[in-house]
């Protein structure tokens, strides 16, 4: 059992609550993200994480001056980490850090099996290792943006669609493989969109599973790799699958709201929302008014 994400990782860093989300979008090997936050650190060292062939990439949301970091029992040079920077750690090398300053971070977990699956999906040679300088921060704008997208879902996991989590964590994995592992596909993916039957089938599956469906299931049904499917769907439809799912949820919600006998709670459940408040937030953001106000306006 890995200690690379979730509560087991939180325990290594003296954090009692460590919310996490996991995807197995690439079938073999899971990619995970964990939020770690401590406002009053103990000045102790973090505990060792069980050794495994996996990497952690940490996105920091707070400045950490003079950060003390060790790998393989050796202390790395001191670095001043800035909010928005990332650091890589190799779990084969027993990374530990002194917890003497407040911190807030997202930690992405990427095992060897996931790296292999990402390379296989891209039809690229498998990655031998990731390149990084122990303890040093990197201004990785892509990871910063993707991490910012995930923060709200960690606070409200029931409201996060599986398509969204798969999409973002898969993008993180591919970015790490390309940026730090030097992954380059042997051939470019086709630039075209989905065939008409593929687009129709993908939309049918999403509509039949408004509560959530895995990205790999859509790709498999269309007989495409995940990376090819995601790009082709976006090109054909004009948005990624998770956004089309939300668009379809809102459309179905409007249909249900015409039935004055259905409560907003029932409408939310029928459209794949976790509860009425989730429906209200998403509907208001998309339409500009609350579901109740929209229903009353149509009834008048």
Image (spheres, rainbow, N blue to C red):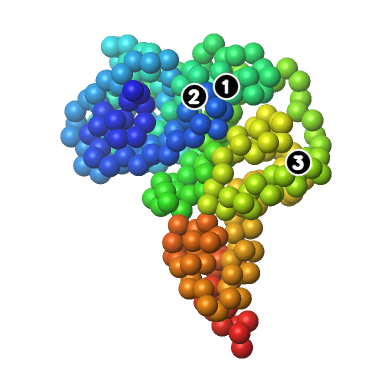
Residue 61 badge? none
Q: Would residue 7 appear left or right of 171 to someone viewing this image?
A: left
**Vertical order, 115 against 219 (above or below):** above
Q: State the residue lying farthest toward the front.
A: 261
**Vertical order, 31 against 167 (above or below):** above
Say whether disc 1 or disc 3 marks the residue closer to the N-terminus. 1
Crowding near the residue tagged with mark 2, few <14, some 14–19, many ≥20 C-alpha atoms within 10 Å: some
- Verify CB contact (< 8 Å) between mark 2 and mark 1: yes
152 and 248: which is toward the camera: 248
Residue 292 is situated, as x and y percent measured from the top left of the image, at 52, 77
Which residue position holds label 2? 29
Discs 2/3, front? 3
Which image quadrant: the C terminus?
A: bottom right
Residue 149 is situated, as x and y percent measured from the top left of the image, at 51, 46
Q: CA distance from mark 2 to mark 1?
A: 7 Å
Q: Secondary structure at mark 2?
A: loop
Q: Secondary structure at mark 1?
A: helix
At 49% across and 18% down in the image, what residue appears? 112
Which residue position holds label 3? 198
Say whether disc 2 or disc 3 marks the residue closer to the N-terminus. 2
Q: Secondary structure at mark 3?
A: helix
Residue 177 is situated, as x and y percent measured from the top left of the image, at 57, 23
At 36% across and 13% down in the image, what residue appears? 93
Q: CA distance from mark 1 to mark 3?
A: 23 Å
């Amino acid at each position: 059992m890995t200690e690379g994400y979730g509560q087991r990782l939180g325990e290594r860093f003296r954090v009692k609550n460590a919310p996490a989300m996991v995807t197995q979008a690439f079938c073999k090997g899971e990619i995970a993200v964990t939020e770690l936050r401590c406002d009053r650190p103990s000045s102790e060292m973090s505990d060792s994480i069980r050794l495994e062939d996996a990497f952690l990439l940490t996105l920091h949301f707070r400045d950490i001056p003079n950060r003390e970091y060790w790998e393989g029992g050796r202390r790395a040079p001191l670095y001043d980490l800035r909010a928005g920077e990332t650091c890589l750690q190799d779990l084969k090398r027993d990374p530990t850090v002194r917890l003497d300053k407040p911190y807030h971070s997202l930690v992405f977990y990427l095992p060897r099996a996931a790296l292999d699956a990402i390379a296989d999906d891209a039809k690229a040679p498998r990655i031998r290792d990731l390149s990084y300088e122990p303890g040093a921060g990197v201004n990785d704008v892509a990871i910063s943006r993707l991490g910012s997208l995930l923060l709200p879902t960690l606070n409200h996991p029931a409201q996060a669609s599986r398509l969204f989590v798969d999409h973002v964590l898969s993008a993180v994995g591919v970015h790490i493989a390309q940026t730090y592992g030097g992954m380059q596909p042997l051939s470019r993916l086709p630039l075209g969109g989905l065939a008409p039957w593929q687009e129709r089938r993908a939309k049918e599956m999403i509509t039949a599973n408004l509560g959530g469906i895995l990205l790999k299931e859509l790709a498999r049904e269309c007989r495409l790799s995940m990376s090819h499917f995601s790009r082709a769907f976006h090109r054909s439809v004009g948005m990624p699958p998770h956004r089309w799912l939300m668009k379809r949820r809102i459309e179905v919600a409007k249909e249900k709201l015409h039935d004055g006998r259905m409560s907003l709670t029932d409408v939310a459940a029928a459209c794949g929302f976790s509860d009425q408040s989730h429906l209200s937030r998403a509907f208001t953001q998309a339409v500009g008014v609350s579901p109740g106000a929209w229903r009353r306006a149509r009834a008048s």
